[in-house]
Amino acid sequence: MRLFGLTSVLFLSVLCYGVDDPDLQNYKRAYDSIAAGNDYTDLGVIWLGLCKFFSSCGFDYYMYKSVIVLVSGFFILQLINHYVKNPKYASFVWVCYLIFPAVMDLVQLRFFLASSIAIWSTQFLIDKAKYGKGKFIILMLLASMIHSSVFFYFSFLLFPFFEGKEKKFAYLVVVCFVLFFFLKSKLLSVANVLTNANRIERYFEGGGAVGSFGILAYTGTILAFYFLAKGMKKSAGAVEANYYSFFQKAVLVSSFLLPLTLFDTNFFRIQRPMWLMLYIGAAMLLDRGTRTIYVGSKKRINCKQSIAFFAVMGFVFYVSIFNFNVIECYFIR
């Protein structure tokens, strides 16, 4: 039975109801405006349609938010169940996810729905499914109509071209990262082509840039993810190789987010679905009886303990330190 996963989804849906979190007033104001008959396309065409539909059904914003969390949670539930066959280890994924980044997903609601669709759609690329690329593209286009930041995940389409060429891919990422960093001032014009100009301009020109401590935390996260992904791939069998190869490349690509955080810390949320991929990867190892992860050529670390510790550190750094107001509204109310 996989009751723990289903219970977790329902728990998150109930937990968010009636909570006045940091983003609630902006979303509620937009929802009420749409319910009154006004168009509010800045938040995405599909988001506009969802707001219109549920408001016409008599849902207030708090009810609407609970439904969106429920739907997003089911995308995550399906992905976990797809890769982790043992319910015990599927529950381990949920425990880690509930520690971090679940509470941040509850706050950034639009991104939660869009990113849950995006991360669910990666299975079509990882499994090399028939028409997988087409399915991924269609789902990503739909998700981008909810939150434009998921355009970043279109980079995943490059991964099949570097199958078995991880070193070449790593070198390419390093070169692109350097170019990305020095040409960051040109990114606004590129972003305006892809998405709503007014909203993206706010992030590039009016956002809150991350400080030096944040840069260190983000850099440390990406490096830790990379070495964990590499260690998991080395520890895994041939059956799971596609998953870990994909995860390792996704972590490398996420390094492009570092220059963007110099504009606004919100860009780093794009990395958040990688945490779920990390937990699933660990559970897949545990499911096949592998209890340790390679770190370096010979040294191994305990899989379950290290991943659980990493989840706690994610909560400490990205919630307790950078977003303590989230703790206040959800746990000290």
Image (spheres, rainbow, N blue to C red):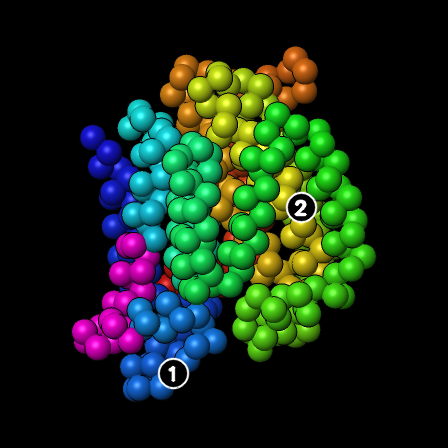
For mark 2, give the secondary structure: helix
Mark yes or no: residue 225 visible.
Answer: no
Assess whether mark 2 and mark 1 are in contact (beta carbons under 8 angstroms).
no
Q: Nearer the viewer, residue 184 or 90?
A: 184
At 41% from the left and 80% from the top, the residue drawn is 40
Residue at the spot x=56%, y=29% of the render?
245
Magenta residues? 52-71
Task: Count residues near mark 1 (Cα–Cα under 10 Å), then give few for <14, some for 14-19, many for 20+.
Answer: some
Q: Position of residue 247 (x, y in %)?
A: 54, 35
For disc 2, the marked residue is 255
The answer to which of 273 and 127 lies nearer the viewer is 127
Query: Which residue appears at 63% of the width and 66% of the height?
Result: 191
Q: Tell me which residue sits at (60%, 35%) in the image.
A: 161
Whether residue 16 is visible? yes
Q: Position of residue 84 (x, y in %)?
A: 36, 29
Q: Mark 1 to mark 2: distance in Å?
A: 36 Å
Indicate which disc residue 102 carries. none
Element under disc 1:
loop
Q: In the picture shown, does residue 36 fall above or below 161?
A: below
Residue that numbered label 1 is attached to: 39
Q: Residues within 10 Å of mark 2 (few under 14, many from 20)?
A: many
Tell me if 4 is positioned left or right of 200 in this view.
left
Q: Is residue 186 left or right of residue 228?
A: right
Q: Specify whether residue 56 is painted magenta.
A: yes
Expressed as whole percent of the image width and height from the top left, the position of residue 25 reads 41, 76
Relative placement, left or right, of 61 versus 310 is: left
Q: What main secondary structure does the magenta stretch of the protein show?
A: helix
Look at label 2 and name its amino acid: Ser
